[in-house]
Image (tube, rainbow, N blue to C red):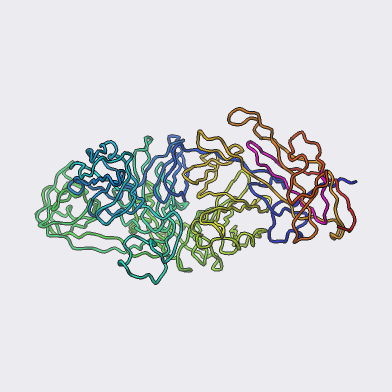
Amino acid sequence: MALKTLQFQPGINRDKTNYSDQGGWFDGDMIRFRQGYPEKIGGWQVENFAAYEGTARSLYAYATSDGAINIGIGTNSKMYIAAGTYLHDITPIRATFVSSATDNCFITTTSAPTTVTVNIVGHGATPGDFVTFSGATAVGGISAANLNLEFEIQTVVDSANFTITTATSATSGATGGGTGITAVFQLNIGSATTSGGLGFGTGTFGRGTFGSSIVAPVLVTSQLTFQDNFNNDLIFNISEGDIFHWTYENTYGNRAVKLNTLSGSRAVPEQVTKILFAPSGHLLALGCTSFNPTTTAGAGISSITRGGTGNTTATLTTSGAHGLATLDYVTVSGTTPTLFSLTSQITVTGATTFTYTMLADPGGNATTVGSYVKNSYGGSLDPLLVRWANVDPTIGPEPEVWEPTATNTAGFLPIKSGSEIVTGINARQETLIWTNTALTSLQFLGTGEVFGLQEISNEINIMGPNVVATSNNNVFWMGNDKFYVYSGRVDTLPCTLKQFVFEDISRSKSDTFFAGTNSEFNEIIWFYVSGSSNEIDRYVIFNQEEKIWYYGSLVRTAWIDSGVNDFPLATDSGNLYSHENGNDDGQRAPAAPVAINSFVQSADMAVGDGEEFILTKRVLPDVNFIDSDLADSTGATLTPEVEMTVGVRNFPGAASSTTDVAGASLERNVTTATATIDQYTDQVFLRARGRQMNFKIGSTGVGVQWQLGSPRVDFKPDGRRG
């Protein structure tokens, strides 16, 4: 008999048949390759004590000047900052209702004792939104403590009524709650995933008229959030929605607010596909509302008086209701003294009064009051427009200032190719912008034009807004039917799993696909939805150092690499996971870890042209168990072990079979006679006979970490008769 060392080409190839890929790996899950040899991937741990609400589609990590590590988590329901093991809800407030709109707004009933109907006219809520009450008194046997809480809205009855569920039951039907109730509504939630159809419940509440037919399908896309930081603060936007700003403070008591509500904000885009800071410090809005300044004549002015510190505060009184809001911009003109005439943000102090700040003391009240206009900056959504905020040469970036002037660097440019901007990312000293058909480079010029555009390719496509990743100055992305790499030019990335991935993929949910990196192992990862799933359930990895591919099954909804965070982070089902942390699927305490099932299986091998049978009697394993756990979470001793399988069959299309040492026939993928191999196993005996043979190794136990080396197999030709 002769011992043969099994040496396999690294990576997995599914674009060949099992038999034609002799000498390679054909299948696997939860494995990677290190220097050409397969090993089990690292495990993960849950980092947050309490689960987050909704489905997370965005992760962003940054460090503050006082040493805090902030992890932004954007879900379809809320926006969080994770600091340590705690989640802080920073979801913006959409609306606040007080008396008289909330007077005695709670209605209880004993037929559904934990369901409370809330009556607030014009609440604007949708099912799944969150609302917080304060100042309420007991109603129908439900205590004030059980009403003055945050609730998820269960159903929307109509524009004036919705229901919540309380922790305790009502003992009587009643209407009440008092007259001091405050109801604070958070931002409307978005969809957790992409869906479409014609049936009942599809689309938004109130769409169409009762009983009307639907002739066109409704497509509801998943809510995506894009994040970046400005010094210690977080700036984010909801796709095709507003830009928000969260001011950091170490107690995490602040909520995010709309960027256009900050003092000094001007012409902030109101619908933005994606925001990010360019390397030059300019905040970019990709695919957004245009800059289209207009003015509206205001009410007549009765008087303008001076006051405040240094007599620089002007109080303007109108002859009728002005209808303005605090932080609106107005331009006052035609006044005497002229110092009262300027464009400024206002503070509303009454229905007919507002104030603004002048540059200097005018020396007295206005003797000629002139007139004023309200300035509006909003335009229509232009899906190919790029706008950027100002960077002041003295104070630096001003992410709230978007109005282009002769003295600032705010501005805009249109992309020429495609019908919409899909996404963008920073690379080297440029920002790459993808439309649905082209890739364009946005480069900082440092001149009066500020930025310039250069089209790189108009023969590409992209699967979704989050499928781009950068590593080692290269940019990788998933197209509609192939993978691409940009390294100064665009190339197709050779892939041994192209057919396997793109022929079993749910393209209708491509907006949820995302890419990430695992720099420790030189990996580019794409998570995607397989053809039979409604949520992300698979990943495919390109190892850029070894130029190989492998894949597996794992449910994750967002990912970021290690950086200011010690481990790569990912999300799923309310959990924030730290990956490459331990060897198992860590559960939220106090649950014990669960084993990660991993395996890799070779393609079929044959002797010569496969005419003769192979008789296999013995395997000499070569397995490394370094970094395996020697005890479980209870302290019980663990023995790291794997299962090795030799499967044989006579024809490429036939099922594998083998026989054990007693001569009993066994089906495909049966383990060796000893069933397991540990670090002290020197050899195992088995009997397997067939024209083709495949080799498999895997583990199903807790605490196991393994790497396969070069096993040897004792086999020989065994005739031509079956």
Q: Quadrant of residue 481?
A: bottom right
Q: Is residue 163 above or below residue 295?
A: above
Residue extending farthest bottom: 215
Q: Quadrant of residue 289?
A: bottom left
The answer to whether residue 700 is magenta is yes
Question: Looking at this view, is 299 or 21 the one in front?
Answer: 21
Does residue 621 appear left or right of residue 460 in this picture?
right
Q: Is residue 413 above or below residue 136?
A: below
Q: Quadrant of residue 458?
A: bottom right
- Secondary structure predominantly adopted by residues drawn in magenta: strand
Does residue 719 appear left or right of residue 66 in this picture?
right
Question: Looking at this view, is 8 or 281 the one in front?
Answer: 8
Residue at position x 9%, y 55% in the image: 302
Bounds of the magenta segment: 686-707
Q: Which of the image's four quarters has the C terminus?
A: bottom right
Residue at position x 18%, y 42% in the image: 179
Residue extending farthest front: 111
Q: Position of residue 607 (x, y in %)?
A: 85, 56
Mark count: 0
Q: Position of residue 245 (x, y in %)?
A: 36, 47
Does residue 367 appear left or right of residue 261 in this picture?
left
Residue at position x 69%, y 52% in the image: 11
Q: Position of residue 297 (x, y in %)?
A: 18, 63
